[in-house]
């Protein structure tokens, strides 16, 4: 690939990330259009893997119910990948839904989380791979479990995370 074509692909990847974030921040299910049907997202801190568009739709509905947003802080891209830093935010002032209690949040058991008047916010590093068509097909997401659990006021989190992971793997 020559430099001009490579630079155009890199700029397209950055535009894709910005458009994905914009759609997500508008609670628009079209944010999922930036993924391939066989998307694979790995939550690196917990090992949870999301492997289908159906799972992503469920997750998006839950996030949009919490008015989730992502505040972009940095994006670096190549012709095939991007490293995106953002602060994920969500309104956690309402009680947890039954689905949230049952499925947890990115592999963390939040069933005993306390309601909060402050918005939930956590820095995230999102590393994604782009197909030749410019869609995201693989993601590795990094964030700090301790920061998450501290905001939820969850005690004894390590054992809860391990139990939830064991349930998901069986």
Image: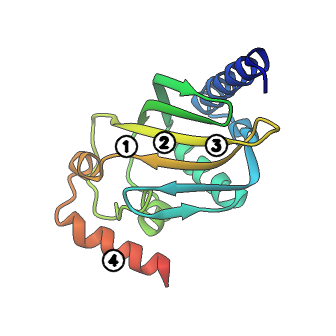
**Is the C-beta separation of discs 4 and 3 under 8 Å?**
no
Tag 4, which secondary structure? helix
x and y percent of residue 90 in the render? 42, 38
Identify the residue at horizontal 41%, vertical 38% (top origin).
Answer: 124
Residue picked out by circle 2: 66
Tag 2, which secondary structure? loop
Tag 1, which secondary structure? loop
| Badge 2 density bin: few <14, some 14–19, many ≥20, Cα 10 Å | some
Residue picked out by circle 4: 163
x and y percent of residue 145 in the render? 29, 52
Identify the residue at horizontal 48%, vertical 42% (top origin).
Answer: 66
Tag 3, which secondary structure? strand
**In front here: 60 or 87?**
87
Identify the residue at horizontal 74%, vertical 36% (top origin).
Answer: 30
Residue picked out by circle 3: 129
- 1 vs 4, front mark: 4
x and y percent of residue 158 in the render? 23, 67
**Is the C-beta separation of discs 1 and 2 under 8 Å?**
yes
N-term mark: 1 or 4: 1
Q: Residue 92: which numbered mark, if any?
A: 1
């Amino acid at each position: 690939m020559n430099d001009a074509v490579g630079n155009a692909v890199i700029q397209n990847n950055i535009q894709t990330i910005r458009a994905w974030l914009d759609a997500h921040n508008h609670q628009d299910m079209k944010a999922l259009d930036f993924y391939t049907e066989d998307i694979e997202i790995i939550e690196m801190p917990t090992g949870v893997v999301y492997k289908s568009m159906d799972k992503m739709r469920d997750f998006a509905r839950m996030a949009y119910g919490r008015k989730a947003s992502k505040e972009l802080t940095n994006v670096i891209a190549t012709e095939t990948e991007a490293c995106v830093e953002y602060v994920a935010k969500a309104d956690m002032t309402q009680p947890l839904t039954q689905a949230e209690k049952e499925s947890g949040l990115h592999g963390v058991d939040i069933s005993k989380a306390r309601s909060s008047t402050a918005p939930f916010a956590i820095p995230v590093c999102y590393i994604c791979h782009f197909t030749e068509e410019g869609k995201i097909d693989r993601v590795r997401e990094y964030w700090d479990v301790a920061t998450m659990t501290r905001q939820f006021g969850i005690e004894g989190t390590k054992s809860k995370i391990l139990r939830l992971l064991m349930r998901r793997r069986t």
